[in-house]
């Protein structure tokens, strides 16, 4: 990772681990800087393992994979966060049993946490396993149930996406804004192929069948977190998917919101950490996208 990202520029100022002048500080340490440091170190370590993992396991389905690299990345992040904020709660994908019910239950058990770190140590594990360069580290911090920091690091492209609540979202230290497309017809939209083959995948396929003919083109690249970062950066006009978990989307949601976009569930209700069926857009095509999904009975 480039040395410029040992610190980061947020709202025109540089944050490091010793800064004590902004609101997202506890014990003299910036939440955002800790999240960036964790994502950077995990991303660098993941890249040393690319093409060299030794153990591959199936979780919920043949589409839901885990390696020792996922688990090692999560341990690294958990340990680093624990060093700085030992009393904060931590919710990581690899610490939860597979399946949507376990995911929802794990989040519910953390509902009383004041500060909750929500981490996907490798979002896009299948891509990582195959050497397809579209995976990332996703780290969010929620305060009393509201996401206040979101960091997504794509180590293949050395791209760091950072957002603080109320302070904008940035990539390469430059402020992001969502795209300006006003219709689906002129939009590049993304979605996913859920691991849950019984409920989520059939619904998403119905949505794909409805949306694909109405957009400029559709992308399915295998990382919800990066798709959300790309909506925030204006590279996509929208993204939806059925059956995601909080660690897939929490950081990316804040990126979109702080870039001027709109995030709801697929029924159009406001986002919260428990939302599993998500729609995130530049705001201009949001109603049209939801209408297409509803017309196909693909909203969950």
Image (cartoon, rainbow, N blue to C red):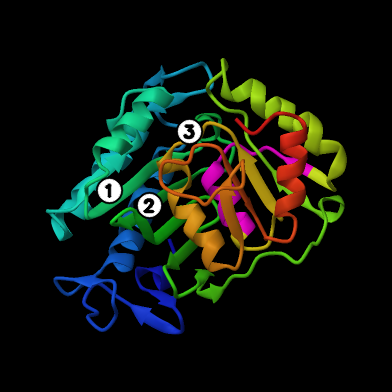
Q: Residue at x 70, y 44 (%)?
A: 290
- What is the C-alpha distance between the residues marked 3 and 1? 17 Å
Q: Which residue has dot 2 on it?
A: 139
Q: What element carries label 3?
A: helix
Pointer 1: residues within 10 angstroms few (<14), some, or many (20+)? many
In the rendered image, the quadrant that contains the C terminus is top right
Work out whether 153 lies above or below 134.
below
Give the magenta range: 218-231
- Is 45 in front, or is 86? 86
> Residue 38's spot in the image, x, y percent?
31, 55
Work out whether 290 lies above or below 298.
below
Query: Does residue 230 appear left or right of residue 42 in this picture?
Result: right
Q: Residue 125 shows which numbered tag?
A: 3
Q: Which residue has dot 1 on it?
A: 77
Query: Does residue 113 appear left or right of residue 236 in this picture?
Result: left
Tag 1 near tag 2, CB within 8 Å: yes
Residue 84 seen in this snapshot: yes
- Is 246 in front, or is 224? 246
Query: Does residue 145 appear left or right of residue 234 in this picture?
Result: left
| Nearer-N-terminus badge (2/3) | 3
- What is the C-alpha distance between the residues marked 2 and 3? 16 Å
| Nearer-N-terminus badge (1/2) | 1
- Is 248 in front, or is 55? 248
> Residue 132's spot in the image, x, y percent?
59, 37
Q: Residue at x 40, y 38 (%)?
A: 49
| Nearer-N-terminus badge (3/1) | 1
């Amino acid at each position: 990772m480039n040395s410029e990202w040992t610190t980061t520029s947020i709202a025109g100022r540089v944050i490091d681990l010793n800064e004590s002048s902004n609101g997202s500080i506890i014990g003299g340490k910036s939440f955002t800087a800790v999240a960036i440091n964790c994502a950077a170190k995990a991303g660098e370590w993941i890249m040393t393992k690319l093409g060299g993992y030794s153990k591959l396991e199936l979780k919920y389905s043949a589409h839901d994979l885990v390696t020792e690299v996922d688990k090692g990345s999560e341990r690294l992040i958990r340990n680093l966060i624990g060093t700085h904020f030992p009393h904060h709660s931590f919710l990581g994908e690899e610490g939860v049993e597979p399946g949507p019910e376990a995911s929802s239950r794990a989040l519910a058990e953390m509902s009383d946490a004041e500060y909750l770190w929500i981490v996907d140590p490798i979002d896009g594990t299948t891509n990582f396993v195959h050497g397809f360069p579209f995976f990332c580290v996703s780290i969010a911090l929620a305060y009393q149930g509201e996401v206040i920091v979101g960091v997504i690091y794509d180590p293949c492209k050395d791209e760091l996406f950072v957002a603080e609540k109320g302070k904008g979202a940035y990539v390469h230290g430059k402020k992001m804004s969502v795209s300006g497309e006003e219709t689906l017809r002129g939009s590049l939209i993304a979605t996913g192929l859920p691991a849950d083959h019984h409920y989520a995948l059939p619904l998403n396929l119905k949505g794909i069948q409805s949306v694909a003919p109405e957009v400029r083109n559709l992308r399915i690249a295998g990382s919800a977190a990066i798709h959300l970062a790309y909506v925030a950066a204006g590279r996509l006009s929208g993204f939806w998917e059925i059956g995601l978990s909080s660690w897939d989307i929490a950081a990316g949601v804040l990126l979109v919101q702080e870039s001027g976009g709109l995030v709801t569930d697929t029924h159009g209700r406001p986002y919260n950490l428990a939302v599993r069926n998500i729609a995130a857009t530049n705001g201009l095509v949001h109603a049209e996208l939801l209408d297409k999904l509803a017309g196909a009975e693909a909203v969950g």
